[in-house]
Amino acid sequence: MGYWRGERASIHLEDAEVLAHEAFAGEQYVLSLRAPETARRALAGQFVHLTCGPGLPMRRPLSLMRVQPESGSIELLYKVHGEGTALLAGRRPGERLSLLGPIGRPFRQDGYRRLPLLIGGGVGIPPMIFLAEHLRRTARHLNPLVLMGSEIPFPFTPRPSTRLVPGLPAEAIAAMPLLEDWGIASRLASRQGFPGCFDGFVTDLARAWLGALAPAARTEVEIYACGPTPMLRAVQALAAEFDLPAELSLEEHMACAVGGCAGCTVLIEEEGRRAMRRVCVDGPVFAAQTVVFQG
């Protein structure tokens, strides 16, 4: 299974209005914007390049978490990490921000196996929520499982899941309410002792579930993941261990985010040939087996 290979769409410049801006523990924020052109065209796995405020010309790339084409709104989850996101945290409803988007190659959009496994870590959680909503809207016959890990409090109030998932450790009962309401099973992992969370890395939780599946059921699994590089390395190894197809959404520092500066390159190997690819426009989603992690 390769990553999505549709035609590369043009990137739209949009004057987005701040609709709401909600703060969570750990300097995390959910930013809601009215950006109808982006909302109309965005696909799960894509991102936007956003101005953070006056006086700071460099934009910041932020993954799309939710998209509402009907209302023309989008939601972004981010954590304050440096000058740009600190400035962004001060934006208030009614203000306007310049936005480029949607950008990048998304996750595959159809042809799914019956048991999609979505793994999100930290600020890699948003694309998993977007993908879960896409599955809910377009492929309701599937039975996805969303696993999320964080070492700071989650940007929502977890609640005990009412959805039984055979094979998961008994202590892992905390879930994301939004996904529960959608009828999608989810579980949370952390090493911080949060109530109801699996005590360990989210990839350890994934391994426990995969290991408990019957061989026939395991052939119906495919993995989609986004998160910090160490987590993605672990997901890549997990996919190889269980011989599963997987797609990874990579996180890299970006300057232009439109393919001009080549400042976000990653080494990719396909059919025995290696080449540098730009995460912003050649990705951010790549087939897991093609990514050559360095360092």
Image (tube, helix red, strand yellow):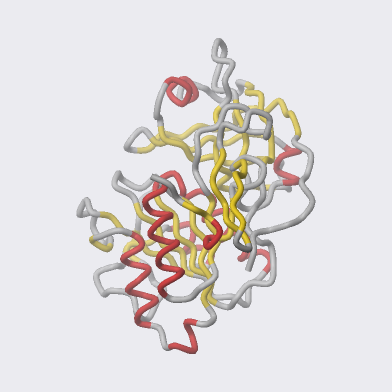
Residue displayed at 50% across by 32% down: 21
Please give left or right for residue 42 compared with residue 220 in the image. right
Q: Check the image and report above or below for 295 versus 84.
A: below
Please give left or right for residue 191 compared with residue 164 in the image. left
Please give left or right for residue 182 compared with residue 168 in the image. right
- Percent x, y of residue 224: 52, 61
- Percent x, y of residue 269: 57, 56
- Percent x, y of residue 166: 37, 81
Quadrant in the picture for residue 188: bottom left
Total number of numbered discs in the rendering? 0
Quadrant in the picture for residue 198: bottom left
Q: Nearer the viewer, residue 47 or 186?
A: 47
Quadrant in the picture for residue 76: top right
Please give left or right for residue 176 compared with residue 191 in the image. right
Q: Quadrant of the C terminus?
A: top left
Spot the residue most to the left: 193
Q: Nearer the viewer, residue 62 or 92?
A: 62
- Percent x, y of residue 151: 29, 47
Q: Check the image and report above or below for 71 versus 273.
A: above
Q: Nearer the viewer, residue 137 or 110?
A: 110
Residue displayed at 42% across by 88% down: 214
Spot the residue most to the top: 55
Q: Check the image and report above or below for 293 versus 23.
A: below
Q: Quadrant of the N terminus?
A: bottom right
Residue displayed at 54% across by 22% down: 52
Q: Check the image and report above or below for 130 versus 143.
A: above
